Image (cartoon, rainbow, N blue to C red):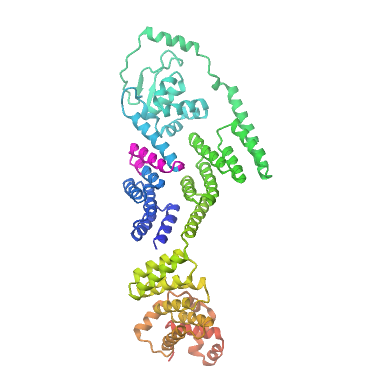
Amino acid sequence: MADEAKAKGNAAFSAGNFNDAVLHFTDAINLAPTNHVLYSNRSAAYASLNKFSEALSDAQKTVELKPDWGKGYSRLGAAHMGLQSYNDAVSSYKKGLEIDPNNEALKSGLSDAEAALARSNRSRAGPGASPFGDAFGPEMWVRLTSDPGTREYLQQPDFVKMMQDIQKNPNNLNMYLKDQRVMQALGVLLNLKFQARGGDDDAEMPSATASNGETPERKRPAASEAEPVKQEKRAEKEPEPENEPMDISEEKEKKTQAQKEKEAGNAAYKKKDFETAIQHYTNAIDLYDEDISFLTNRAAVYLEMGKYEDCMKDCDKAVERGRELRSDYKMIARALTRKGTALVKMAKCSKDYEPAIETFQKALTEHRNPETLKKLNDAEKAKKDLEQQEYFNPQIADEEREKGNQYFKEQKFPEAVKHYTEAIKRNPKDPKGYSNRAACYTKLGAMPEGLKDAEKCIELDPTFTKGYTRKGAVQFFMKEYDKALETYREGLKHDPQNQELLEGVGRCMQQINKASRGDLTPEELKERQAKAMHDPEVQNILSDPVMRQVLVDLQENPNAAQEHMKNPQVMNKIQKLVNAGIVQVR
């Protein structure tokens, strides 16, 4: 039952229903409170809801239960990141890497945590800190894109590289103060208007007028200090090569040539000429590194060739470069999905599907692609199947079933269910475990669960008569007497002298005849009619025009009714309505 709740939680998490995922994982934890994976999964769900305190608590419990499991430290680091406890996050990721040095999630998490810690440290005013550090945070690109004056600069690679350098370390701003575009961008980010002194070329950090009209105090440099700057700027008055129209044309030419290389690579890939395809994609990457599809295409070739490490390296490069270029999230998702596919291929040898599952989940946070979701579900199923194979042990299954039998004799049915469930896990192809657990569920009044186990028992071995007696008993207790009768009769085909099945037929016939004779009490009649309203078979009979005419003839035309009764199918349907209390016999 804990596994079922866990599976529901995983499905809800994959679908983005994080609140439902938390509820299902909580149900699973209540059933299996020492399972570290359940706390790990719920921590991820809480983190997705931005409930980082709860995520931290579950992550700590995960590490407590399984201190040698790297993923627990990944959850711990993520929770600390959400709470902006960057030192603790760095420490958690490092601890995890000591246990699992090759864990990609821990490596990526550590990189993010160290970068966040560095940004946090820079934001605190201190000796040597840039007073403009906050201006170059995550919102920098959004603000530059929104301003019409700086939007066009984002198409210029040299400007983008300068801003990236400043974003990494705001103190690097001093290196680019002579560039008018940087000064204009700084004005946009600080909501200031910089006034030039002595023309466009003299745009050092002079007086700045705020948007509210106030002018910050600033000491004017002495003439002796300003003069060398003027001389230096006159020497640099020629426009830099990156801005010349000829270089823009050259950039376009490279991009066009790279696209041709990509198309040639695609053609070679279709012909299964993988080495040639790789060469063309590599040429495209060398010519123009601002299109990550060249990397993902080359990764696809490596995947086909079985070079999974090379495939994953290209995917990681594509993700990293894509984030720098702010590429379409669908492209980043594609790179992550391709990496996950390579990890699945490798898992067939390593028997570790967890890295692939994590990668597919990351891809789905970028773009909810049905193909990626299917790959995730397949990987989770493969992991579950592998766990079942590794857990398979018929000898232990028999031992657990015997323990369950002892508890059953003592009428300790919940304890019996626990051991029967373990027996099923150890040997899921043995129908006896399902048969015994169905009997327990029946005693506990859990009829749907009992019916499910009985049907599984019959599915595994259609000749195993216990399955029919279990199923018939459940249907009888659910007052579905006609269905129970059918089940008992089906069992008798395999074992005609089985006493339990024969007695079951007798009990069903007694109840059915009671309805046929009109011996039902008003309460029993009302109960059966209410139940019939939810029975699809009864509703289909009542909506059938032919059967409606038969019912009319039963009341108004006895001769026609007798003809109808000669048809076995009509007779069976009439008997169904009698059993349901819809038709009464007097």
The residue located at (38%, 7%) in the rendering is: 224
Quadrant housing residue 255: top right
Magenta region includes residue 93: yes
Magenta range is 79-104
What's the magenta bit mostly, secondary-structure-wise? helix
Name the spot of residue 542 as percent of width and height, x first: 48, 79
Relative depth, front residue between 348 and 270: 348
Quadrant housing residue 256: top right
Relative depth, front residue between 87 and 53: 87
421 lies above or below 331? below
Relative depth, front residue between 329 and 376: 376
Name the spot of residue 115 as percent of width and height, x first: 40, 34
Magenta region includes residue 362: no
Screen quadrant of the N terminus: bottom left
105 lies above or below 217? below
The residue located at (51%, 88%) in the rendering is: 553
Name the spot of residue 165 as percent of width and height, x first: 45, 27
Relative depth, front residue between 139 and 336: 336
- Number of numbered discs overlaid on the protein picture: 0
Name the spot of residue 293 as percent of width and height, x first: 57, 39
Screen quadrant of the C terminus: bottom left
- Left or right of 100 on screen, residue 298: right
